[in-house]
Image (tube, rainbow, N blue to C red):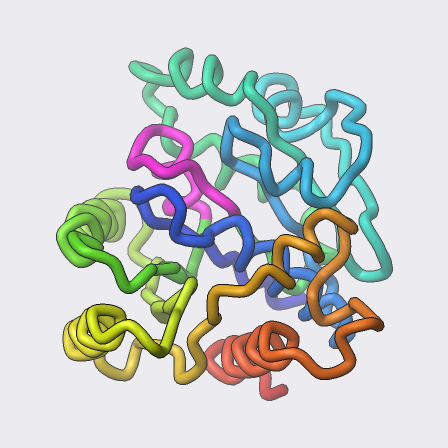
Amino acid sequence: MKKDVIIFSNQKGGVGKTTLTRELGIYLAGRGRMVLLIDCDPQGNLTRGLTEEDDGLGLYEAIEGGALSFKNIKENLDLLSGDMRLSSLGKSLIGEIDAYLKLKELMYCEHFNKYELILLDTPPSLGVLTINALTAANYLVIPMRPALYTLQGTNDLMAAVAKVRKTLNPELNLLGVIINGYESIPVITQELTKEIEQSFKEKVFKTHLSKSIKLEEAIAERQGVTELKKLDKSRAKEEVGRIGAELLVRLGGGQ
């Protein structure tokens, strides 16, 4: 089975990496795709937003000892969890010859073969864990908020991506940029959005994800916003659906 590995990355915090990873993962699973979410962030927000209890078996154990424990979240959707121990793992890997290949090597395991899509949530940094994810992925999605200095931070990410492509992973490609936390009224937001669109052109997804309390409510209920029955009609639900559909088109898999 063809497997697409997508990293959601931006070293700036608060841009919606975790929100987009979970919402799109849930959406894609609901469309019948076999999806695995991997929480590469020591903060573990993706894990906490999907599971009530963590048995302590996740990415840390998988890399340290090869003990794989996928948590089934719902039909077609599994999770390889993350927690604070990943911080010490990141430090211990520094200096090892294969420090940046651990996650890629892990994915050679046959247990990953059943998944069509693997989505990687990453820390707000360009450290060892993020470089591991960049090395393991074949597609990069950059969540961005229309805020001051956003593009300056993204330049650092793109420089790191260029180095990864040159030395570790020539198959890594930019799938697109998703503007998150969008508010249409402030003039500064509109200006910054245009600046992002001018910089990344066709790589910017057509649909922006608006700032919405509904996304927080979905996390609190450990559901995707597209699943909330009380939101038969909501902007957040419609936007996530359109972004997910465009993601599939960009992957060449249709809707």
Looking at the rendering, which quadrant does residue 65 occupy?
top right
Q: Residue at x 55, y 64 (%)?
A: 212
> Split into 4 quadrants, where in the image is the N terminus?
bottom right
Q: Residue at x 77, y 39 (%)?
A: 51
Q: Position of residue 216 (x, y in %)?
A: 63, 53
Q: Position of residue 172 (x, y in %)?
A: 35, 58
> Split into 4 quadrants, where in the image is the C terminus?
bottom right
| Span shown in magenta | 121-136
Above-or-below relation of 109 to 170: above
Q: Residue at x 51, y 27 (%)?
A: 42
Q: Position of residue 237 (x, y in %)?
A: 65, 75
Q: Is residue 47 left or right of residue 146?
A: right
Q: Residue at x 31, y 42 (%)?
A: 11
56 or 110, which lies in front?
Answer: 56
Q: Is residue 99 left or right of residue 164?
A: right
Q: Examine the rendering and report whether any part of residue 224 can be seen.
A: yes
